[in-house]
Amino acid sequence: MELEIIEQTDQTLQFIVKDISIEMVNALRRIMVGWVPSMAVDEVIILKNDSPLYDEILAHRIGLIPFTTDLDAYNLPEDCECGGFGCPLCQVSTTCEVMNDSKNNLVIYSGDLKTNDPKIVPVNPNIPIVKIGSGESLIFEAYAVLGRPNEHVKWQSVSNAFYRYLPIIEFDSSKCKNCPDKCIVSRMCPENLYEYTDGKKSPELVEEYWKTCTLCRSCESNCPETAIKVDYEDKAFIFTIESDGVLPFDVILRKTFDIFLAKIDEAFEKLESAEIQE
């Protein structure tokens, strides 16, 4: 398997992966979306709530706040020695105590939450939770634990993960000389993959067309001279991961393959223990 990174930002990673089957790449995507754990609030104790929101709605909003995650420092509750009752190895406590002494309304943000571990904090301190009026207050305790997104979406470590085939476009511009409708290809392509400038007899395919081509085949089906052939590599994909920052991309990929290999080992163990009749 070959992997080449195309683009990486704080929230997006895009890479080309080759020599891999579509079944394999889809399995990796499903593990990223459903099995890679992250930290999220799972229990909220509201001590005082003067806001217009009911306690249940407020707890739901707090639970959806993404937290930075350290997979090496914390255990899943079911794997912890405490049995999931809550200890420093599987649980992070957070508190919020805000009193509005001003005459104006006050918005409480995710940055107002204080945790007992500086490594486990809200990814973005500017997520609004609720608004309280003058003289009102909000006091609560919350406990964050590791969880898997197949149990609840709040534990999802990636916002989105998707892939598409790596496109291949063959363009024979010499056939454009006798074209009855010049520039039709450049007009029909929704991704503007063909450039046509004055003084040129035919359009030109942009150099990095494969980055944005969606394989819609509009250019191929609308070219009157059949000068374009659109295809794709059978075992090459452009893979894109979008994250809100709960885990670094290298940790997400490493954990994905760890889970994948563990599931293969689990499958072999079950096959060996199963009684298969001939």
Image (cartoon, rainbow, N blue to C red):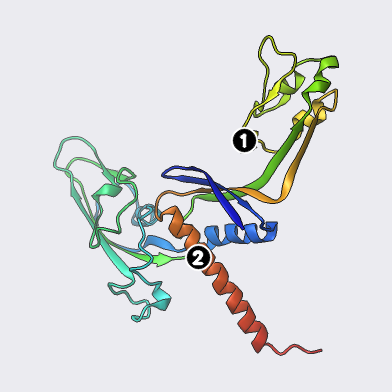
Q: Position of residue 113 (x, y in %)?
A: 25, 53
Residue 157 marker: none
Residue 188, given in percent of the width and then of the height, sits at: 73, 24
Q: Nearer the viewer, residue 92 or 22?
A: 22
Residue 71 rendering spot, x and y as whole percentages: 38, 65
- Relative to residue 116, is residue 179 drawn left or right? right
- Residue 260 vs residue 87, the one in the foreground: 260
- Disc 1 target residue: 212
Q: Residues within 10 Å of mark 1 (few under 14, many from 20)?
A: few
Q: Earlier in the sequence, mark 1 or mark 2?
A: 2
The residue beneath circle 2 is: 151
- Name the quadrant containing residue 247: bottom left
Decide if residue 47 is in sight here: no
Q: Nearer the viewer, mark 1 or mark 2?
A: 1
Report the quarter where the C terminus lies.
Answer: bottom right
In the image, what residue occupies the spot 31% across and 74% down? 86
Identify which amino acid the numbered label 2 is placed on: Glu
In the displayed structure image, the side of residue 39 where residue 196 appears, left or right: right
Along the line of sight, the residue nearer the viewer: 130 or 177 = 177
Percent coordinates x, y for residue 104 in the rendering: 20, 35
Q: Residue shown at 65%/26% (left/top)?
A: 192
**Residue shown at 69% from the left, 23% from the top:** 204
- 217 in relation to 181, above or below: below
Residue type at tag 1: Thr
